[in-house]
Amino acid sequence: MFDHPSAGVVAAEKGNERLELRYGKLILATGARELFLPFPGWTLPGICGAGGLDAMARGGLPVSGKRVVVAGTGPLLLAVAAHVAARGAKVVAICEQAPLRSLIQFAGRMLGQPAKLAQGIRYRWAVRAPMYFGCWPVEARGDGALEKVTLRTRLRRWTVTCDFLACGFHLVPNTELAQLIGCRIEDGLVAVDEMQRTSVENVLCAGEPTGIGGVEMAVIEGQIAGLAAAGALNEAGKFVPRRRKMLGFVRALREAFVLDPELRRLASDATIVCRCEDVVYGDLRRYSGWRDAKLQTRCGMGPCQGRICGAAAEFLFGWCVEGVRPPAFPVLVASLATASTVSEEVQEGS
Ligand SMILES: Cc1cc2nc3c(=O)[nH]c(=O)nc-3n(C[C@H](O)[C@H](O)[C@H](O)COP(=O)(O)OP(=O)(O)OC[C@H]3O[C@@H](n4cnc5c(N)ncnc54)[C@H](O)[C@@H]3O)c2cc1C
């Protein structure tokens, strides 16, 4: 077994090799993942996360001439729509679940961050597709792969033909490694002080695990953490006012893109929630909590270890998804075997 990390050591994998990394200071910068909310048909090939489609297109997936619907919530939608359009995709709709008034308020708050506002306007300008607010996909259909998606607003429902649906309901900070190390988590985020120090000595954290605030904020936090870890606290302090200013953006994002409670009703009883173990919504709603549901249905016990369905279950059922265990990511059996040998050797020698 991989043990809980002991102070000053993290186990890692590089290719087929298991590494034991010893550190004086550790900076965690594990980013965030997309939140997927299950709806009928969401597991069809052709449907992926918003950032996921962008990453695949950058990685060589041909999107030129393909009809793409971008849906979910947050500024990422416009960025993804602009990026795939630049690669020749025909974006047929951008569906933002937040209502228009939230977006107007958000834009108002962005007046203090003109660069971000200008970036949003540039992205919107680059895509001629209609943008709908208070809108999301309710069903996807296709024979073996996505062909059609049904969208809804409060006033109407309609179906569009498309090849790809890029759908992400904002981001979930990757806090697993920080949790395993014992860092304090507050409101789903790794708690840090102004020098990016966590509650665990010699462990710092930067970027999205401490708050979703975009690339600029992640870079500033990385600079503070790096300088602080090197003992250059005065130098690090010079970046603190910029970070403080960016916290307004983090708050504005969180408030503008709050998920509509109606999204909890997207899944039908037959909709898969845990795609690793094929557990459907109807199986889960009989249970009162994550632990119970996990033990009875194997939800969250597959290869992704609840990274996808856990966050969805939190939103759908209001469950508290606890219980992070090592390893933080699936690893090779060989690495597990070496890990047990190493810990046995340590025990024998101690
Ligand atoms: C398609 C797309 C477009 C975007 N456009 C913009 C934009 O226009 N403007 C903007 O401000 N922001 C944008 N963003 C958001 C921006 O990319 C992020 O805010 C930024 O990258 C966050 O930086 P980070 O260092 O926190 O995380 P990341 O850049 O995500 O880096 C985290 C890294 O940690 C790795 N990792 C995670 N867990 C582990 C582990 N246990 N062990 C080892 N490694 C691990 C991940 O694989 C990843 O490489 C965009 C994001 C996407 C996906």
Image (spheres, grey):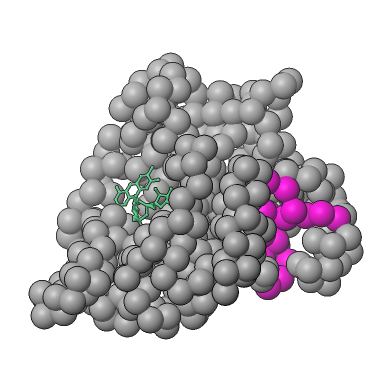
Percent of width and height locating residue 132: 48, 46
| 24 vs 340: above or below | below
Identify the residue at horizontal 54%, vertical 29% (top origin).
164
Percent of width and height locating residue 223: 20, 64
Identify the residue at horizontal 52%, vertical 37% (top origin).
16
Quadrant of the snapshot with the C terminus: bottom right
Foreground: 292 or 165?
292
Identify the residue at horizontal 63%, vertical 55% (top origin).
341
Q: Which residues are magenta?
A: 297-320
Instruction: Give the residue furthest to the front.
Output: 349
Identify the residue at horizontal 26%, vertical 78% (top origin).
195
Foreground: 272 or 337?
337
Instruction: Give the residue furthest to the top.
Output: 65
Percent of width and height locating residue 166: 51, 37
Foreground: 322 or 74?
322
Query: Which quadrant of the structure image shows residue 9?
Result: bottom left
Quadrant of the snapshot with the N terminus: bottom right
Q: Is residue 87 left or right of residue 347?
A: left
Residue 222: in magenta span: no
Residue 212 at least partly seen? no
Query: Which quadrant of the structure image shows residue 232?
Result: bottom left
Residue 309: in magenta span: yes
Residue 183 at least partly seen? yes
